[in-house]
Amino acid sequence: MLAELCLSYCGMAALALATYRLRDLRPVPVGPLRAAGMVLLAGALAGAVLRLGAGQGVVAFLATAGLAGIALVLILSARPRVAVSPLLFAVRVAGATRRPMGTALHPDGASAGG
C-alpha cells in the first residue's frame, strides 16, 4: 500500500507541476509531465488491483489517491517546492539508474551484455 501511495503522490505532483500556476517551480514542457502523471497513477491502480484483486484494489487505489491528493494540497499551500521535491528526486534517481536495453547487473557489480 505504501508503493501505491508513493506512486499516487508522485503522479499527482507531476499533474500539479503541469498546471499553469506551478510552472514557475520547474519550467519544463507540460506534455511529458501530464503523461508521467497519468502513467504513475495508472501504475498505482495496477499495483493495487494486482495485489488485492479488482474489487478491493480499486477501492484501495481511490483511498491512496485521495490521501496523496490531500497531502499534496496541504503541502502545496504551505511550501510548494517541498511538495514536488519527492517527484524531482525520483526523476533524478530514475535517470541515474537507467541502463541500456539488454544489459543486466551481476551480483558482483559488473555489467553484463555489452
Image (cartoon, rainbow, N blue to C red):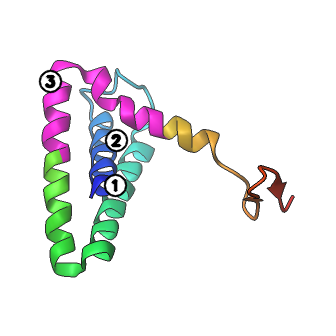
Image coords of residue 16 (percent x, y): 27, 37
* Residue 89 part of the magenta segment: yes
Q: Nearer the viewer, mark 2 or mark 1?
A: 1
Tell me the crowding category of disc 1: few under 14, some 14 to 19, or many 20 or more residues within 10 angstroms, Cα based: few
Q: In the drawing, does residue 77 fall left or right of residue 17?
A: left
Residue type (three-letter) at the residue carrying disc 3 = Ser
Q: Which residue is mark 3?
A: 77
Of mark 3 and mark 2, the one earlier in the sequence is 2
At 19% across and 28% down in the image, what residue appears?
Answer: 75
Of mark 3 and mark 1, the one earlier in the sequence is 1
Q: Nearer the viewer, mark 3 or mark 1?
A: 1
Tell me the crowding category of disc 3: few under 14, some 14 to 19, or many 20 or more residues within 10 angstroms, Cα based: few
The Cα atoms of the two marked residues, 2 and 1, are separated by 16 Å
Q: Which residue is mark 2?
A: 14
At 83% across and 59% down in the image, what residue appears?
Answer: 112
Magenta-colored segment: predominant secondary structure: helix
Task: Report the span colored magenta.
Answer: 68-90
Image coords of residue 15 (percent x, y): 29, 43
The Cα atoms of the two marked residues, 3 and 1, are separated by 24 Å
Residue type (three-letter) at the residue carrying disc 1 = Ala
Image coords of residue 64 (percent x, y): 19, 54
- Which image quarter holds the N terminus? bottom left
Q: In the drawing, does residue 96 fall left or right of residue 10?
A: right
Q: Secondary structure at mark 3?
A: helix
Q: Are marks 2 and 1 in contact (CB under 8 Å)?
A: no
Q: Secondary structure at mark 1?
A: helix
Image coords of residue 31 (percent x, y): 41, 45
Q: Quadrant of residue 73?
A: top left
Q: Which residue is mark 1?
A: 3
Of mark 2 and mark 1, the one earlier in the sequence is 1
